[in-house]
Amino acid sequence: MTNIIFLDIDGVLNDGNYIEKCYERHHQPMSMDFVPFNPRSLDNLRKIYDSILDNNNEPLVVLSSSWRLNERAHYIVNARLAEYGIYVKETTPYIHQNRGTEIIKWLEDHNHLDSPFVILDDDSFDIECFEELKLHFVHTSFKRGLIGWKAKQACNILYNKGGLNETRDRIKSGIY
C-alpha cells in the first residue's frame, strides 16, 4: 500500500532558528532559496519515510509547497532530499493557493482516496478548514520546523487514520 507524505518546505525543512544559525555563521543575509535545509528536520523526515518502509509500504512524497511552482526551487528540493534518499515523485496542482483544496484534488485525481496520508505544513488556515484533513495534519512551527515529536505524530497518523474515504466515513458517523 502507498503511504503519502504531503510536504511543505518552509517551516518544515527550513526553519527560523536554523536560518538565524546560518546567518550567524556566515554573516550575510540568507534567503530561503539559499539556506540549507535543517539536517535535524531532514533526519526526522527520513524517520517518517523509514517507518513507512519498515511496514512494507511504499512512501510517496508529494510536494505541496510553493517551491513546486518554480522549476529552480523544485530542483533544489529534489537535490537536497536526494542526499537523504528521499525523492519527490509528484506535486499538488495549483488551485488559488489553497493547500487543502489542492491536496484533496490530488488524492481524487490520482485514485488515492483510500491511501494513508499525512500533511506536513506550518500553515494551517487553508488545511484546517477541511474537517477531513485536520486528522491527517501535522502542524509544524516556522521557528522550529519538523521536530522529533512531530515526526512521531506523523507516523501515528499514517498508521491510525487511514485514507480520505475512511476519514469521511468516520466524520459522517461521528467517530473521530
Image (cartoon, rainbow, N blue to C red):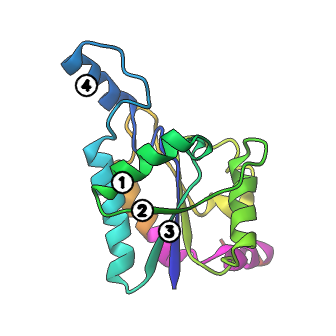
- Image marks 1 and 2: residues in contact by CB distance under 8 Å: yes
The disc placed on residue 46 is: none
Per the image, the residue denoted by label 3 is 157
Is tag 3's residue or tag 2's residue first in the polypeptide sequence? 2
Q: Is the C terminus in the top left, top right, bottom left or bottom right quadrant?
A: bottom right
Nearer to the camera, 159 or 2? 2
Structural crowding at the residue carrying mark 1, measured as other residues with C-alpha within 10 Å and reported as few (<14), some (14–19) or many (≥20): some
Per the image, the residue denoted by label 4 is 21
Is tag 4's residue or tag 2's residue first in the polypeptide sequence? 4
* Amino acid type, mark 2: Tyr
Q: Residue, x 43% and y 83% (percent of image)? A: 57
Which secondary structure type mostly characterizes the magenta part of the structure?
helix
* Amino acid type, mark 3: Ile
Structural crowding at the residue carrying mark 3, measured as other residues with C-alpha within 10 Å and reported as few (<14), some (14–19) or many (≥20): some
Is tag 1's residue or tag 2's residue first in the polypeptide sequence? 1
Q: Residue, x 34% and y 48% (percent of image)? A: 80
Please tell me whether mark 3 sits on a helix, a strand or a loop: helix
Measured as percent of width and height from the top left, residue 130 is found at 74, 56
Q: Residue, x 31% and y 64% (percent of image)? A: 85
Structural crowding at the residue carrying mark 4, measured as other residues with C-alpha within 10 Å and reported as few (<14), some (14–19) or many (≥20): few
- Image marks 1 and 4: residues in contact by CB distance under 8 Å: no
Task: Name which quarter of the figure residue 92 lies in.
Answer: bottom right
Q: Residue, x 40% and y 38% (percent of image)? A: 14
> Is residue 168 highlighted in magenta?
yes
Per the image, the residue denoted by label 1 is 81
The disc placed on residue 87 is: 2
- Labels 1, 4: front one: 1
Is tag 3's residue or tag 4's residue first in the polypeptide sequence? 4
Please tell me whether mark 1 sits on a helix, a strand or a loop: helix
Give, as a single range, the part of the protein colored magenta. 156-172
